[in-house]
Image (cartoon, rainbow, N blue to C red):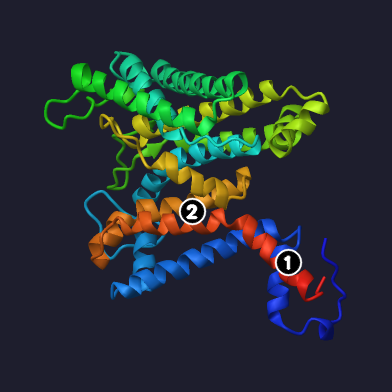
Amino acid sequence: MIADTGDPKADPRSGRRFLRLLAEDKTSPIAIPVFSVLLTLIAAAILLLAMRKNPLTAMAAFLRGSGFMIKPSYAGGQNMLTDFLSFLGILAPMLLASLGMLVSLRAGMFNIGISGQMLAAGFLATVLVGYADLVPAIARPLVVLIGIAAGGLMGAAVGFLKFRFNIHEVVSTIMFNYITSYVTGFYINTYFADIISRSSRVCSPAARLTITGLTFGGLRPTIPLGILISAAAVFIIRFLLDRTTTGFELKAVGLNRDAAKYAGIREGRSMVLAMTFSGILAGLAGVTYYLGYYNSIVPKTLDNLGFDAIAVALLGNSSPIGAVFASVLVTIFQKGSVYMSSTVKVPKEIASVIIGFLLLFSACNGFIHYYARSRLEKNRWI
């Protein structure tokens, strides 16, 4: 902890106060992510200025495209509410994927296979339930259960390989990504492809985790059920990590595996559990994405959402509540990119560049904390 003398003459410069915010144990978990966001916005503004575009106009377009600001005009049956509901539809899988990433990070592991686990869960739920003639009351719970089972089994396999054979989880998850991508691609192209789009055939409305076909007040909203799943997941994961023995064991293994083992914690069990929970959340992200926000699967394609979840988890400081705010920010850039591109006249891929900046600065959180503390110690301000 950094002591504060309380004497304004002892610390007259605002720079010192700023460094204290970044170095103080109580304030750094919030101050450093906010600082990372500010650095990202500055970098994005410089990039947009280099392209001779107004950064404020571009940022407003991101917000309008996500339903946070009113657009100058809307298509029939659309307004700010329908845009915001659509935003919630893509926010749900992003939040679930980021929760999966932070659970693995809490145990000192890195689940880079989120995208593959999403695809596996989405594919199995599509072919087993999405093409079946079932009523919504049966189909939708089955979709959720398949997402839990598929993602959990893949995550458990990664954890087992790590513990039993010391195969690094980054290597095994990358290999699982390739296997899942090509196996699902083969079956989609061979048995389940739409002859026009060449994507998988669309699922039945009864199996989708989205309520469509509603009309009221001249609007045609789409209600995402996945946001309810993701909200429940936030509270469950927070309780698991902060209030249970299992959460304590995962954190102990992540901080120091040898010390945890010496204390009697079964490190193998904790690693398998961490990757299982991570896979379950990734599987839920997959079904809310492929049978929720979207309604088909592009063969041999891993969605970038699973990789963007890395930035969200880091920006959220590996906290479930922090992941909520980070997910909202990243999803604004993703969702609003199309509208921003059409109005500001820049490629929509600029959103991926901004998210890349965010990932870069978020990955420097530890260095920012160390640098701020070292500067204070060097100048004897602590």
User: Tag 1: Cα neighbours inside 10 Å, few (<14), some, or many (≥20)?
Assistant: some
Residue at screen point 75% across, 62% down: 24
The residue lying toward the viewer, choosing from 293 and 310, is 310
Quadrant assignment, res 350: bottom left
Q: Is residue 152 above or below residue 345?
A: above
Q: Is residue 161 left or right of residue 196?
A: right
Q: Is residue 44 left or right of residue 102?
A: left
User: Tag 2: Cα neighbours inside 10 Å, few (<14), some, or many (≥20)?
Assistant: many
Cα distance in 3D space between marks 2 and 1: 24 Å
Q: Is residue 98 above or below residue 75?
A: above
Q: Is residue 193 left or right of residue 120?
A: left
Q: Is residue 189 above or below residue 94?
A: above
> From the image, which quarter does the N terminus lie in?
bottom right
Percent across and percent down for residue 290 are 35, 31
> From the image, which quarter does the C terminus lie in?
bottom right
Percent across and percent down for residue 234 are 59, 38
Most extreme residue toward the left is: 196
Q: Specify whether residue 188 is in view.
A: yes
Residue at screen point 34% across, 40% down: 222
Percent across and percent down for residue 262 are 82, 27
Classify mark 1: helix, strand or loop.
helix
Badge nearest the viewer, 2 or 1? 1
The three-letter amino acid code for the residue at tag 1 is Ser
Q: Which residue is mark 1?
A: 374
Percent across and percent down for residue 85 are 39, 46
The three-letter amino acid code for the residue at tag 2 is Leu
Q: State the count of labels.
A: 2
Residue at screen point 46% across, 20% down: 150
Residue at screen point 36% across, 69% down: 47
Q: Which residue is mark 2?
A: 359
